[in-house]
Image (cartoon, helix red, strand yellow):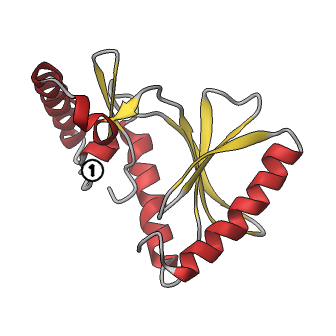
């Protein structure tokens, strides 16, 4: 799925407008991020928690169930230092798509930092990642999507996010 997929763009445009109306016009929060798979938004008074919305795209109903399973897997390992915390995940009556509520993590992903990464930072991230992943694997859970975009590095600390396909 790409940013230019017309169906995805129409779903996001409609969702984006609806979310903006509810969140910004009514002063309830704001949209933080939109990509080809999800929309992240905040609710006023809920910081540091934010919501992740996965819209119901064509041929993706089975994918929503996979993401729901991934959210559950993330709950099972969230006590491990370095794993992003998740408060809840659910489908809501009358709203298409899946919602998950996550703890906001400051910083940038390694993908966003890739042009400015020093060798020491890369080495530290690899060491921390090995420790975190070993603990996750000890609970017999596989992330299945480890990549720089799913690793946040801030203040010399690595955090793993997005267990969507775990």
Residue 153, image x and y in percent?
A: 31, 27
Q: Name the foreground residue: 29 vs 13.
A: 13
Task: Choose between 78 and 10: the one closer to the eye.
Answer: 10
Is residue 96 visible to the viewer in this orientation of the structure?
A: no
Which residue is depicted at the point 76% across and 28% down? 45
For the N terminus, the image quarter is bottom left
Farthest residue to the bottom: give it.
59
Identified at 89% across, 44% down, the residue is 26
In percent of the image, x 21 and y 33: which residue is there? 135
Residue 117 coordinates in the image, percent (x, y): 20, 28
Q: Position of 135 compared to 32: left or right? A: left
Q: Quadrant of residue 118?
A: top left
Q: Is residue 91 visible?
A: yes
Horizontally, is 138 left or right of 87 in the view? left
Q: Residue at x 24, y 39 (%)?
A: 136
Secondary element at image label 1: loop
Q: Residue furthest front?
A: 115
Quick one: label 1, few (<14), some, or many (20+) residues within 10 Å? some
Q: Looking at the image, is 60 positioned above or below residue 151?
A: below
The quadrant of the picture occupied by the C terminus is: bottom left
**Residue under label 1:** 143
């Amino acid at each position: 799925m790409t940013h230019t997929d017309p169906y995805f763009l129409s779903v996001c445009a409609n969702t984006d407008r609806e979310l903006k109306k509810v969140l910004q016009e009514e002063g309830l929060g704001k949209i933080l991020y939109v990509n080809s798979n999800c929309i992240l938004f905040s609710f006023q008074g809920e910081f540091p928690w934010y919501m992740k919305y996965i819209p119901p795209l064509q041929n993706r109903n089975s994918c929503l169930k996979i993401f729901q399973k991934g959210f559950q897997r993330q709950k099972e390992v969230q006590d491990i230092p370095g794993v992003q915390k998740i408060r809840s995940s659910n489908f809501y009556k009358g709203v298409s798509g899946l919602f998950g509520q996550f703890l906001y993590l400051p910083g940038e992903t390694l993908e966003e930092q890739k042009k400015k990464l020093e060798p020491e930072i890369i080495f530290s991230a690899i060491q921390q990642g090995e420790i975190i992943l070993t603990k996750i694997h000890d609970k017999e859970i596989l992330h299945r999507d480890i990549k720089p975009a799913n690793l946040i590095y801030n203040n010399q600390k690595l955090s793993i996010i997005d267990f969507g396909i775990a």
